[in-house]
Structures are given as structure tokens and as C-alpha cells.
């Protein structure tokens, strides 16, 4: 399984795949449903919602590329597509080598933008390098029919599949299918929860970096950075400053990375303008990651660095929508009203179950 791209060969995408334009659904004609809606988005595997227009369904086990988003994604299950979404199909394609192939295809994505769309004809002419089948002496096997390349090289589908398996992706197909079957999002049924009701929210230590030292480092130092979990250093114990415990979440209240939210794995101090969220009840890592993603997304939409920052909002009116606990289709109401004035309870079990269906989520256990 040695990764040696120098031995790989070049293939034209149009020779490797049957490349076609999808049946496209105009979103104005969309009906409510549970079929994934794949668009030209460059995020979230192209997923932009769920609809029920069965006559527009495209079969899964293919790669999709959106003209403007230009990013390739593997689609395991059936889906509905928006306009200018293309499919790449091959009889050897599966979820494992599909992940490998989209990685190669996405090396080309930066060549495109909204002024230079990745349209079907351009996709067919693209060139990607792949490992090829070889004999015991390491010489490339040549197919006289030249099915996949004008030089007769044959992609080593099995090698790609087994390489991806080594990356611990065995549960991937099961997880994707489970998500599509059991986790149809109906965000319209979700309820708003104030951040200060979900967590014990407060300011961090507010320690300037100049006041730290690292002669005998003991604690992580968390700033407003968006990389490395926000950890920008490892510092000595600071007299009269109590570190926050592992498992608490840091939240950047301002600056260029406003909204960066991370679970801290070790005890930590914080820099200026960083809030700390500590759970009111025990929450799993899966649940906290779900909440962190929603917090970051809310910040992108409603708040602005150096303008409308979080300082005066995170303990007052900052809210996110969450699924709520139900029984027989009706909301379960908490008389103590711990999480909301209406007594709604976040459906922690649903959130954790959903997160555990996602690729790589088993690595969090």
C-alpha cells in the first residue's frame, strides 16, 4: 500500500467515467420530502435540503460536480439535483474508491471560479493521475482494448479501495445510508434556545499573552484563533488564575475569527475576548460538536467582526435552533424550564444519534 504517485498514470476524465447532466429540479417547484437535494454548493457534500419530487430522482453511487461550486462529491444514495450539476459514473465505483477519486478530482477545483464554471465539456477533458494495475514485477498492465486510456492503462480500483480502508472508513457506507433513512431534517419543527440557557456561559480569564511564560508549561492557552482548536500556546501556571476544565468550550467573541467555537481537550486559560461555555448537564463530545457547528453558523449569518460582535449578545440574546424532545409526536415539557421559558428540552439523543452516523464520528469514541 505504498503511496508513490510517481508510478501513477494520467487518465482523461471522459475516458474513465460516463459524464452526464443530471435531471434538474427548479427549487420553486420543490415539494417537501426526505430525498437529499444536491446543488452546486461547494459545502456539505453539495447537500442543500431535502425534497420529495420522486420524478427528479437520480441514482446514487456516483460522483457529482456542480458547475460553479466546482467541487466533486461522492453520492452514496439516490438524490435530487439542482441545475448545472453533473454526474460521473463507472461500473467499478463504490463508496471507498469514490472517496479516493473525488480527492483527485478536487485537485483541479481551484482552476475554476464563478467566472470560469466547471461545465460538463471541461470536466470530460480534465486529466487526473491514478494508480494503475501492474504485474508482479511492477510493470503496468496494458489493456489492448484501451477501455480507460489511449495508452491502455487500467486504474487499480482495488488498490484505491484498500488504501481508503486503511484510513478507517469501513463504517462510511453504513453511516451515510443510516443518515438518509433515519435523519430527515425538519428544521421547521426545531425551537430556539438561548446559549445562556444551554450552558453556563461566562468570560474567560482574559490573560494577555505578554503576561504568560512557558518555562514549566502546564496549561493550554486559548485565543480567538480559528485553527488548532484555538490553542495558540502552552503556558506556565498563573498565580490567582483558575484554569477552565477539559471538556469546556471556548467561543471567540470578536475579531477576524468571531464565532470560532471549540471543545477544549485539556485544562486551559484564555486570552482576551474569549468566552467559555460549561455544560449544565453532562453532554457528549458528539453533542458538543453539533452545537459548536450551529454556533459558528449563526455567527456567520447574524454577527460581524469589528461591528456587531458577540460580547453583548452571547449571554443575552444569542440563540440557536435545536430539535426538541417529543413523546407521541408532542413536545415533552420540562416544568422546571431549565433550557427554555416554554419548557422545551433539546433532543440530546437525536443529536448524538445523528452525529454518530457521520463519517469519522467513530473516531470520537
Image: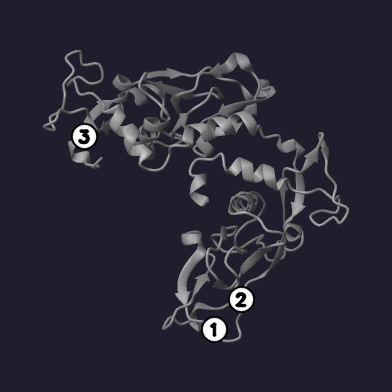
Mark 1 vs 2: CB contact within 8 A:
yes
Dot 1 falls on a residue whose secondary structure is loop
Dot 2 falls on a residue whose secondary structure is loop
Residue 18, quarter of picture: top left
Of the numbered discs 1 and 3, the one sitting upstream in the chain is 3
Q: Position of residue 96 (x, y in %)?
A: 39, 32
Residue 67 can be seen in this image? no
The vertical placement of 205 against 200, above or below, is below
Cα separation between marks 1 and 3: 54 Å
Q: Residue placed at 59% from the left, 28% from the top? A: 36
Q: Position of residue 44 (x, y in %)?
A: 53, 38
Q: Position of residue 260 (x, y in %)?
A: 57, 58
Residue 186, quarter of picture: top right
For the residue pair 297 and 362, the one nearer the viewer reads as 362
- The label number, if any, that marks residue 205 in the structure image: 2
Q: Residue placed at 51% from the left, 32% from the top? A: 174
How many dots with numbers? Answer: 3
**Other residues around mark 2 within 10 Å, as few (<14) / some (14–19) / many (≥20):** many
Report whether 164 appears left or right of 259. left
Dot 3 falls on a residue whose secondary structure is loop
Cα separation between marks 2 and 3: 53 Å
Q: Nearer the viewer, mark 1 or mark 2?
A: 1
Report whether 67 appears left or right of 290. left
The vertical placement of 285 against 97, above or below, is below
Q: Residue placed at 22% from the left, 29% from the top? A: 132
Residue indicated by mark 1: 238
**Other residues around mark 1 within 10 Å, as few (<14) / some (14–19) / many (≥20):** some
Residue indicated by mark 3: 8
Kindly give the residue lying farthest to the right in the view shown.
335
Amino acid at each position: 500500500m505504498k503511496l508513490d504517485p510517481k508510478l501513477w498514470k494520467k487518465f482523461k476524465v471522459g475516458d474513465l467515467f460516463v459524464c452526464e447532466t443530471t435531471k434538474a429540479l427548479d427549487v420553486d417547484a420543490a415539494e417537501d420530502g426526505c430525498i437529499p437535494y444536491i446543488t452546486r454548493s461547494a459545502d456539505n457534500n453539495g447537500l442543500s435540503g431535502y425534497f420529495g419530487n420522486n420524478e427528479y430522482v437520480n441514482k446514487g453511487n456516483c460522483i457529482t460536480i456542480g458547475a460553479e461550486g466546482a467541487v466533486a462529491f461522492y453520492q452514496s444514495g439516490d438524490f435530487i439535483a439542482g441545475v448545472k450539476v453533473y454526474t460521473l459514473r463507472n461500473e467499478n465505483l463504490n463508496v471507498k474508491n469514490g472517496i479516493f477519486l473525488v480527492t483527485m478530482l478536487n485537485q483541479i477545483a481551484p482552476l475554476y471560479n464563478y467566472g470560469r464554471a466547471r461545465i460538463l465539456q471541461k470536466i470530460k477533458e480534465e486529466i487526473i493521475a491514478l494508480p494503475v494495475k501492474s504485474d508482479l514485477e511492477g510493470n503496468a498492465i496494458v489493456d489492448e482494448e484501451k477501455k480507460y486510456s489511449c495508452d491502455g492503462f487500467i486504474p487499480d480500483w482495488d488498490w484505491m479501495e484498500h488504501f481508503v480502508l486503511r484510513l478507517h472508513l469501513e463504517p462510511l457506507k453504513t453511516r451515510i445510508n443510516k443518515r438518509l433513512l433515519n435523519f430527515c431534517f425538519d428544521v421547521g419543527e426545531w425551537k430556539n434556545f438561548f446559549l445562556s440557557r444551554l450552558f453556563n456561559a461566562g468570560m474567560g480569564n482574559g490573560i494577555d499573552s505578554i503576561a504568560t511564560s512557558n518555562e514549566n508549561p502546564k496549561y493550554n492557552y486559548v485565543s480567538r484563533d480559528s485553527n488548532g482548536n484555538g490553542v495558540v500556546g502552552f503556558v506556565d501556571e498563573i498565580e490567582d488564575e483558575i484554569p477552565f476544565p477539559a471538556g469546556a468550550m471556548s467561543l471567540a467573541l470578536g475579531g477576524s475569527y468571531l464565532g470560532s467555537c471549540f471543545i477544549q481537550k485539556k485544562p486551559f486559560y484564555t486570552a482576551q475576548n474569549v468566552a467559555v461555555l460549561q455544560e449544565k448537564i453532562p453532554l457528549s463530545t458528539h453533542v458538543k460538536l453539533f452545537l459548536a457547528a450551529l454556533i459558528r453558523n449563526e455567527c456567520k449569518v447574524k454577527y460581524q467582526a469589528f461591528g456587531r460582535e458577540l460580547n453583548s449578545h452571547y449571554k443575552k440574546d444569542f440563540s440557536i435552533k435545536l430539535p426538541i424532545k417529543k413523546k407521541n409526536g408532542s413536545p415533552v415539557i420540562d416544568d422546571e424550564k431549565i433550557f427554555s421559558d416554554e419548557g422545551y428540552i433539546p433532543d440530546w439523543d437525536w443529536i448524538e444519534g445523528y452525529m454518530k452516523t457521520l463519517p469519522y464520528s467513530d473516531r470520537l469514541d
